[in-house]
Each structure stands twice: as structure tokens, then as C-alpha cells.
Image (cartoon, grey):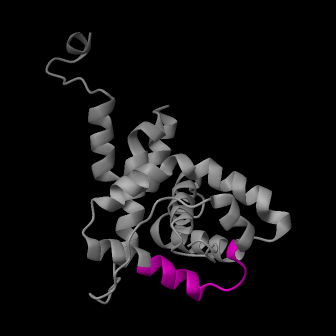
Amino acid sequence: MIDYLHKGSIPFGIDQIMAIIENEFDSFKRRKIAQHLNIDIKQYFTQEYLSEILEDLLKGTTIDPNTQLTYKKPVNYPDKIQINYKADDVEAAISELETVIEEFSKIDSLIKNYESDQQGKIKLRIQTDYKNANGSFKERLKIMVENYLRMFANEKDDDYRYFITAVLLYHFEQCIIGNKTKTE
């Protein structure tokens, strides 16, 4: 049918269209186009979002080569949330973490692909930004999410907000930021 309408045309599928879009537009515009075309954004962009966020966190971050920071097995997050949030915020915080927890295995897998010094840089960047934010854990988390959105994406980009929150809560759960439980 395509050849009948226009001789010599090359048909494009979703993969070819997405490749063109990926090369021509920034991540915010790519996601908007994908939404407009009714393309499953999670299928095409989840890994990309997480990789971009981790790469952005790496940019311009230096670390002392003697610093050893390792990722651990998950902690009992309800206990960790209780010591980092006010009693009124605990339920909402648990719900927020449980909303993004499915991304933790993807984040962990991506982080393990980095060299140990790069992993350390990501952690140091998040720790430094956490220390530079003021307020309670909840307030600091909100400040960090908003700052990263302004630096790396667009403040109106809810998908990127979701993945930034996932990366930060992953590091919270790993005890990189926030108060630690007694067993940590």
C-alpha cells in the first residue's frame, strides 16, 4: 500500500520512529511525542530515564579514591521510614516508597554496571546534595527532587519526577541518605 501511494518509500515501524525521535529530541520532548503517539512509555524509556539520571548525577562529581562505599541488601524500610519521618507522614512515605520499589532492582542493576569509583561518585553526589538541603528528611527529599528536575529535565515532567524519586528512595533504602536504623 505504501509503495502504491509513493514509489520507493521505506515503511517505518515504532522502533525506527523511536530511533529518529531519540536522536533529534531531548528526553522531555521524546516522552511527550511518545505519549502523543500512544507508545508505551515505560517499555521504551524506563531504562533510559534511570541511566540518564545516574549519568547526570555523575557529571562533575569527584571522589577521594580511598573512599569505599558499597551497596547493601535492602533494610526493613518501614523501620527506616519511622525514624526519618514525622508520625503523620509515615503512611504516605511508606506508600511513596512502595510505589517506586519495583524500580529498585533496575536501579541496582544499572549501578552495578558502573566502576566502583563511579558508584562512589553517584553516592557522594546524593549525600552532598542531601546534606546541603535543609529541613526534615521529607523536606530534603522534596528539595532534591525539585533541584534534579530543574537541572536534568523539566519541572513539569512527571515521569522523570517518578524516576528521580525512585533513585533517591533507593539510596535512602540503601542508607546512603537519612538516619540509619539501630541495626545498620
Quarter residue 64 falls in:
bottom left
- Relative to 169, is 134 on the left or the right? right
Q: Residue at x 35, y 53 (%)?
A: 109
Q: Position of residue 56 (x, y in %)?
A: 38, 70
Numbered circles on residues, count: 0
Give above or below for 22 relative to 10: below
Magenta-highlighted residues: 124-138
Q: Residue at x 78, y 62 (%)?
A: 90
- Residue 140 showing in the rendered view: yes
Q: Nearer the viewer, residue 24 or 57?
A: 57
Judged by its main secondary structure, the magenta piece is helix
Give above or below for 101 relative to 82: above
Give above or below for 173 relative to 10: below
Q: Residue at x 63, y 77 (%)?
A: 179
Q: Quadrant of the N terminus?
A: top left
- Relative to 100, is 37 on the left or the right? left
- Relative to 4, is 121 on the left or the right? right
Q: Nearer the viewer, residue 16 or 47?
A: 47
- Residue 49 showing in the rendered view: no
- Relative to 169, is 58 on the left or the right? left
Q: Residue at x 64, y 50 (%)?
A: 98
Residue found at the very far right of the displayed protein: 88
Q: Nearer the viewer, residue 5 or 100?
A: 100
Was residue 91 drawn as part of the magenta stretch in this picture? Answer: no
Was residue 131 drawn as part of the magenta stretch in this picture? Answer: yes
Residue found at the very far left of the displayed protein: 8
Q: Position of residue 103 (x, y in %)?
A: 49, 49
